[in-house]
Amino acid sequence: MPATPAADRPGLQPTAFAPLPLGSVRPLGWLDAQCRLQAATITGRIEEFWPDLGPGNMWLGGGVEGWERGPYYLDGLTPLAHVLDDPRLKAKAQRWIDGILGMVRPDGWIGPVQAPDRQAYDHWPVFLVLKVLVQHAEATGDPRVVPAVTGFCRWLRDNLAAVPLRDWGKHRWADGVLSIHWLYQRTGEAWLLDVAAQLAEQGYGWRAHFADFVHTDKTPREACVLHTHVVNNAMAVKTAGVWWRQSGDPADAEGPRRAMAALDSRHGQATGIFTGDEHYAGLDPTQGTELCAVVEYMYSLEELLPLFGAHELADRLERIAYNALPGAFTEDMWGHQYDQQANQALCTVAPRHWTNNDDTSNTFGLEPNYGCCTANLHQGWPKLVRSLWMRAPDGGLVSAVLGPSVVSAKVGGAEVVIEARTGYPFDMDVTYRVVSGAPEPFGLTVRVPGWCEGAELTSPDGSDDLEPGWHTVRRVWSAGDELRLHLPMRVRCERRYRGAAALHYGPLVLSLKVPAEYRLIAGNPDPAPGQRSADYELLSAGEWAYTLELGSDATPHVAIERREVRDDVSPFTDAHCPLRASAFARRVPDWGLVMNSAGPTPESPCPGSGEKEMVTLMPYGATRLRMTELPTVSAPD
């Protein structure tokens, strides 16, 4: 097992929290059911029928693909296998790991030197491989990893001058720095920091990009370049923060906040993501966002949260993870979209006003538009699970992101196990139950989200009212002790593009549910072994053009209906979603389709016509056709 990382190696800034090794956190309840659904479908079965990840992949010694798709897939398969402790998935991942470690060249390069139709010595896919190897080492202690990562870092040291970063690697250099810093924490070899500095010097200047953000509108097709690419930007949210660890520059520490603010102000969406189909696309809720960008934005936040400990980062991570992530999949998780829309009236093979994507981009299936998301989607849920818990600087445990889970970690030499029992984000309570404690006092830190007012924490020592932020209870924790966090939720109305309203309830975004008719266009809805999964168009089977009616307080009156949160099924389905809402609305008859999407949102106030109706709202992640931003009108006197 590699040496325990030093807390304060010279040359690296101390962090607010420390991530726990992969496998320390396991999902419970609905989150366990969600991860097991993924394991039984797209992640656990895709090698059977998608040639790009089949036995001929170059990362397995074959002649197919050999660029980013194998590493992308493994970057999700590996954490899913370990958060579920699933022997079948572990064996799948191990086969890839063994193949990759068997391809370490004498000069340190890892994997294929040249993938088909690619220039030789592309750093980017190896940066992905390093991330995989780091996770694998943390989970298994595999002694082969540190020498392999060290060897590649030596290759970088000796070759970056002659073979500098280019294209994707130039824009995604922070992913390489993360693995270099991980290695430095374990070996203390100072030359590694010099290699990281070379990557930063050759890499694209994202800090300056966001400090003087000139991409204020939808990108013209002829202006689409790598620094306007949605996935590069989702990855770039973390770049200045990752480099701050080594630079110590306050401007780098401020970089992630500036990046998020720039993207929100010009391209942001109610779910916390930003548009890019597949380049910057503005604020219109009918523009799309690539699924790759969703999972990479989540990963950026998951890396920034332990660096800086800002509770707002966890708030954003929950908003994306509990809305945009599930909203891009079919209920059975066999199919996904390349581009999701906040206002999504239908999903068909047809031209839309994307920046440069094709006519299949918002259909659900195996490989709509392009296969990068098919390979990269797998990391979303398992990396979220890993990030639910972290370690505090004093050795205590931090419930950083809220969700049903169990953590096992050494605290003061004792094995501590704590369960977080909750239906969150669908209910308001989290009960922390100590399964095994420690003889010495330690801190259990919980987070009150920024949207919450009136939070209450009840511990064995009493009750307290809490403000948003971090709160620590320090005591000797014994088996059976409980800590209960109550987070009142209320509907909040956010004004967005053209004055439309987006409704939030806790971390959930509420969308008008549009009934959908599924039309099979390829593949198999319930694939047998060796058969490929299905592709679907979704046609609207109901009305979607409504204006929300405001009450006397100038906000929509929304009634919330709760159901039991089941532990055995995904909650992001029409049948099993434990939360519904209703509101008064009127139809807008002249609001129709434009280029196969909902037309421009009418300016508010928008009177509508006809009788007042009660419409159904659902959590965004439980909808496939939806209207998330709606115009409003005051109720008649």
Image: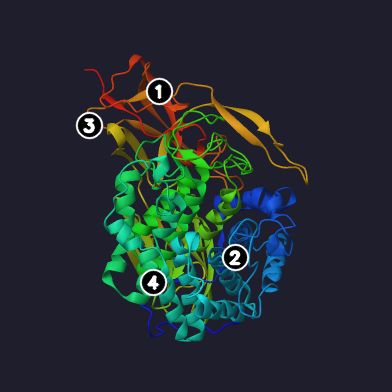
Mark 3 or 1, nearer chain start: 1
Residue to which mark 3 is pinned: 553
Q: Nearer the viewer, residue 241 or 555?
A: 241
Question: Are discs 1 and 2 less than 8 Å apart at CB?
Answer: no
Q: Element at badge 3?
A: loop
Residue to which mark 2 is pinned: 120
Question: Are discs 3 and 4 less than 8 Å apart at CB?
Answer: no
Foreground label between 3 and 4: 4
Foreground label between 1 and 2: 2
> Percent x, y for residue 214?
29, 50
Amino acid at the residue labelled 2: Ala
Question: Are discs 3 and 1 less than 8 Å apart at CB?
Answer: no
In this view of the protein, can residue 401 be seen by the observer?
A: no
Mark 3 or 4, nearer chain start: 4
Q: Element at badge 2?
A: loop
In this rendering, is residue 497 above or below 445?
A: above
Amino acid at the residue labelled 3: Asp
Residue to which mark 1 is pinned: 545
Cα gap from disc 2 to disc 4, whole angstroms: 21 Å
> Percent x, y for residue 46?
69, 50
Cα gap from disc 3 to disc 4, whole angstroms: 54 Å
Residue to which mark 4 is pinned: 201
Q: Residues within 10 Å of mark 1 (few under 14, many from 20)?
A: many
Foreground label between 2 and 4: 2
Cα gap from disc 3 to disc 1, whole angstroms: 24 Å
Cα gap from disc 1 to disc 2, whole angstroms: 52 Å
Foreground label between 3 and 1: 1
